[in-house]
Image: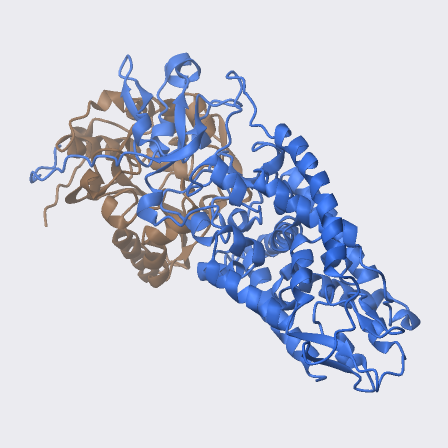
Amino acid sequence: MKKGYKVVIKPNIGWDRKPEMAANTNPELVGALVRMCKSAGASEVIVFDHTCHDWKKSYANSGIEKAVTDAGGKMVPGNDEVYYKEVELPRGVNLKKTKIHQSLLECDVWFNVPVLKHHGGAKNSISMKNLMGIVWDRGFFHRSDLHQCIADTATFHKAPALNIVDAYRIMKSNGPQGKSEADAVTLKSLIVSPDFVAADTASMKLFSQVQPTDIKDVRYIALAEKLKVGTQNIEKLNVKRIKL
Amino acid sequence: MKFFKKIRVVLSLLFFLPILVFFLDFTGKLPTEMHLFLHIQWIPALLSLNFIVIGVLLLLSLLFGRIYCSSICPLGVFQDIIAWKSRLFREKKKKLRFDYEKPQNILRYSILVVTVVLFVFGSSFLVILLDPYSTFGRIVSQLFRPLVIWTNNGLAVLLNKYGNYSLYKIEQLAFVPLAFIVAVIFFFKVSEMSVRKGRLYCNTVCPVGSFLGLLSKVSIFHISIEESSCTHCGLCEKQCKSQCINSKTMEIDDSRCVTCFNCLSACKQNGIKYDLRYKRKSSSVLETPSDIGRRTFLLTTGAVFTTMAFATTKSIGGKKDSILTRKPIMPPGAKNINHFNAHCTACQLCVTKCPMQVLKPATLEYGISGITQPHLTFSTHIFCSYDCNICSSVCPTGALKRLPVEDKKLTQIGVAKFRKNMCVVHTDETDCGACSEHCPTQAVHMIPYKNGLTIPEVTEDLCIGCGGCESICPVRPYQAIYVEGVATQLRAQKPAEAKKFDKKIDDFGF
């Protein structure tokens, strides 16, 4: 990230849930990232999500709106089709084109900041599943093989500079919105990688210690690897395991 | 006493503006407590059996006459504003514009009687259509509010272009042709009557006006003409928007007088007084009570037959299963369909306050008696928000019982029905789970299917009918999971919490 850059941070703000439930990205993490971008000289830091619940309530009750505006960032709505512009996905299998939020198309660099969660439909929601919040028409995903469409979206030419997976609190069950705080587990962890597939693979291994899950069932990870989005073979990568 | 009119105008605006603004507000930023302004309306107070308000309103009417019509009723004030503004389009010589006219007694009392009788026989049809407050609510919500939102959206698009997001686009989803047509008809009819004939609507059509007219005939204070000072100049008559002053005979029809005090201000001789009725001989009563009694009796008989005709047409239709039509889904707090249909006046307040816009005025879902009463309709992203109880907290008529959020979360307004043979997991053998994803209670949850796939299952006892599942189901036009309305809202079971995980994880896992 360079001085004067227009930055977008895309957390998960899908649900009208308080931070303790781990349904959304941790507001403190988002706030800290906005501050870092600002102090690195970003001209503007924009944060948005295409929410599932009422967007105003989700922005407010997730704590993210306050964290972002306090840190000098700007919350932008994603609730209307006018904010989305069509983009070709030439490498996509089922999803050949889709409408993506204009702020991502216009920015100089963006960061994908999901929260690690169990998910009733996609099995798990991590960095690639978080991309469903940058597109307008999600119904198409559910109609046309959810996993393949998620993998297809990960071929979007403007990849995030980093995937920053929030695993401070994870949602182990009843995802993606959770029933109560009992679904949340505090791991105080963070997984960071520019590689979607590697980030999701590592996250699944962390997650499986709490809730054993076969990564093969999270089909979009293998499908994305097939589309050369990244690698599941994280042992071949230069992984830094840091404990504080 | 010339300042009486000014007091009346100020008082009217104090009641009118908060109601107007509350109905127009689409941001949800105004405090919901503003609904208290609506509890002091006659019909809502009667339906919710708010005895304090009823007592105060009765006392006001018996003391001062039709203060309610003059200042408290938003439709009354609305007519005054329309008539006042219409002066801009009049020729100058036509400025003084009213003449005495005879009361439409047969019409007004028969409407009153038919409305009451129909209600007693279980149909709110006329209460809904004729309650002046609810008529006002429908006009504002169906006609004025869209204009305000369009203006906002226009500005929002403009500002957003320049990177300013202080305004945002509001989608308008509550367009229902029948509700719109009802609002248009009343808007034009009420406006036209008020421009031509002042308060003719209040004195002919409105059942509340007719009822209060019976009280104002005997109110302690009333308006009268002092014979000694009257020159029969007719200024008072020309200013009387109720057309109830006969300046030639110096008679005033108290039953139609809405105590607007225009005549007090108009009279140059100070010949019109607003004071005690019972200190002098009453010469201003136009009809003897027995006269009215005889007429209304005859009319009541006719009304009963009309009622029978209406009562038999009320039905909630039988539906085919293959297409997605069903029993109507009532807002949370409606208790049961009889209570709800009888108490809701379709004022549209809950419809305008619903942040999810899931509430819409009904067409014939509740039968002919329930047109424009609110019901839930789900569409993509439009469902009943789990933590929201706004509709039940603002309802002024008691049709929706006030529900604390914790109770609302357990109130079953409908039950999800899963049609497996239509589900994409079954038909396409791919993962989906959008319904379960949106289910706040996990009444809709995923169970193993085949090849590592999972498929939805509904635990009906846990389902509250919020429609999250139906709203997001990708199978269209008829969803594979949908919510069936219930006739009586029961309490759902409290969802069990997940087992807490309290082992310490110290490894990366990779």
Q: Position of residue A104 (x, y in %)?
A: 44, 44
Q: Residue at x 76, y 61 (%)?
A: B288
Chain drawn in brown: A
B65, above or below B474, in the image: below
Q: For residue B85, what is the image quadrant?
A: bottom right
Q: For residue A117, what is the image quadrant?
A: top left
Q: Position of residue B371 (x, y in %)?
A: 61, 38
The one nearer the camera, A147 or B284, is B284
Q: Quadrant of the C terminus of chain B?
A: top left
Q: Residue at x 15, y 41 (%)?
A: A240
Q: Position of residue B393 (x, y in %)?
A: 43, 52
Taking B476 as reference, is A232 left or right? left
In this orientation, does residue A12 appear?
no
B116, above or below B234, in the image: above
Taking B174 as reference, is B435 left or right? left
The one nearer the camera, B1 or A125, is B1
Taking B213 as reference, is B155 left or right? left
The one nearer the camera, B22 or B192, is B192
The one nearer the camera, B371 or B114, is B114
In this orientation, does residue B424 appear?
yes
Q: Quadrant of the N terminus of chain B?
A: bottom right
Q: Position of residue B193 (x, y in %)?
A: 79, 56
B491, above or below B141, in the image: above
Taking B169 as reference, is B497 left or right? left
Report which colour depicts chain B. blue
